[in-house]
Image (spheres, rainbow, N blue to C red):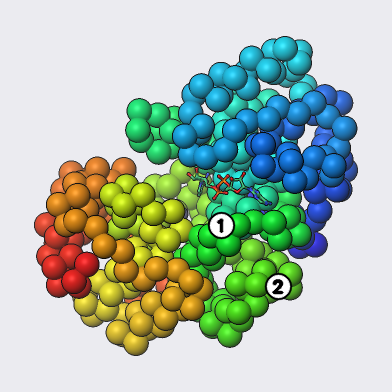
Amino acid sequence: MKTLKVHGAAGDSNILVGEGLQNLRNYIPAEHAIIITDTNVRDLYQQDFPPCDVITIGTGENIKNLDTVRYIYEKLVELNAERSAFIVGIGGGIVCDIAGFTASTYLRGIRFGFVSSTLLSQVDASVGGKNGVNFGGYKNMIGVFNQPEFVICDIDLLQTLPAQEIYCGLAEIVKHAALGDAGMFNYIEKHCQKALALDSEVTAKLVYDSIVIKSSIVNQDEKEQGERRKLNFGHTFGHAFEKTTGVPHGEAVAAGMVIAAKLSAQRGYLPLQEAQRIEKLLAKLKLPTKIHAPKSALLEALGKDKKRQGEQIHFVLLDEIGHAFVEMISIAELETAIDDLGI
Ligand SMILES: NC(=O)c1ccc[n+]([C@@H]2O[C@H](COP(=O)([O-])OP(=O)(O)OC[C@H]3O[C@@H](n4cnc5c(N)ncnc54)[C@H](O)[C@@H]3O)[C@@H](O)[C@H]2O)c1
Ligand SMILES: [Zn+2]
């Protein structure tokens, strides 16, 4: 097992990569612990849960809303959960985002931790302290910054993931390497097949290296005022593809990274061969490198980008593999890029 720390304004988070769900009981600090999980994770792993109260929610992005939060509040009241209670979210990004938000608001905030059970949540969602739910058709509109006390990343849990979930997690891993660690990028290129097969040694290294990058950025800028924006590499077009075509997040981000890399090359920051390396690696990892979406819908979605400031978007570019920077790009320039790059 390897450990890392995220330093949040309201407290630290210990990330434990390679720890097992069956050891969760050793990390629960309170008498009264309550597990929040979803139906899939409960059905697969309930036998390894410590003996605690369990609140089970449904699955899918549609349940990531205030109705589900309300349902959990009601259950917490029924279970007589007091300020000393401790919440553990066991699941993917949806469970962790909801559990973190509910814990942060119930009784003005009670303590919480996560057992992260998808590749995407291990490398991204459960690290960094963003907790929240969707509202009014907008993703993650309501939420808080608050760090879980611990995050257990149990690599063995990943064996039961559907293939598409693995590809989507790998997209965020490539993102971390591309924006922050050239050595890690080379490593993924060399160990593609093992990464796809979830080889435990390779996966543990990729999860750990990803969290090193994400946590070091979050430690500099927890609330996304500067440095943290780099984590949005590939996400400007990624979110627009997700919105317009409904493709899964990781796939949309993969195609978005290819555009961001090509745009970096077009602007003279990144050698074209390096942009092509990113495209090739994503293809090897069974991720789409191009997504077709109607230009007008794409532009409309870009115009609604949460990171937009007037007509300008904070766009993440690369000047080498392993180094990202943010440049303000106007929607009009992105429109030209859509034409030039043949998107
Ligand atoms: N807070 C953040 O910083 C942050 C960052 C990135 C993404 N997110 C959020 O994360 C969410 C997506 O997370 P996700 O991809 O983990 O989705 P998810 O939580 O929906 O999990 C995907 C599916 O896998 C199932 N599952 C979970 N663990 C499993 C296991 N070990 N074996 C088999 N099936 C398993 C789930 O039940 C679900 O059906 C989105 O809502 C997104 O907004 C948050
Ligand atoms: Zn993402």
As drawn, 89 above or below 325: above
Residue at mark 2: C-beta within 8 A of ligand 1: no
Q: Is residue 228 visible?
A: yes
On the question of residue 122 being in view, the answer is no
Q: Is mark 1 within 8 Å of ligand 1?
A: yes
Q: Compared to 122, does 131 lie above or below?
A: above
Position of 272 compared to 92: left or right?
left
* Residue 161 in the figure: left or right of residue 231: right
Marker count (numbered): 2
Q: Quadrant of residue 76?
A: top right
Q: To which residue does mark 1 refer?
A: 165
Q: Quadrant of residue 195?
A: bottom right
User: Please, is residue 143 above or below residue 248 in the view?
Assistant: above
Residue indicated by mark 2: 199
Which sits in the foreground, 141 or 4?
141
User: Mark 2 near mark 1, Cβ–Cβ under 8 Å?
Assistant: no
Q: What residue lies at 63% left-to-right and 30% top-to-bottom?
A: 57
Label annotation for residue 112: none
Q: Residue 207: where, in percent of width, then height?
A: 64, 64
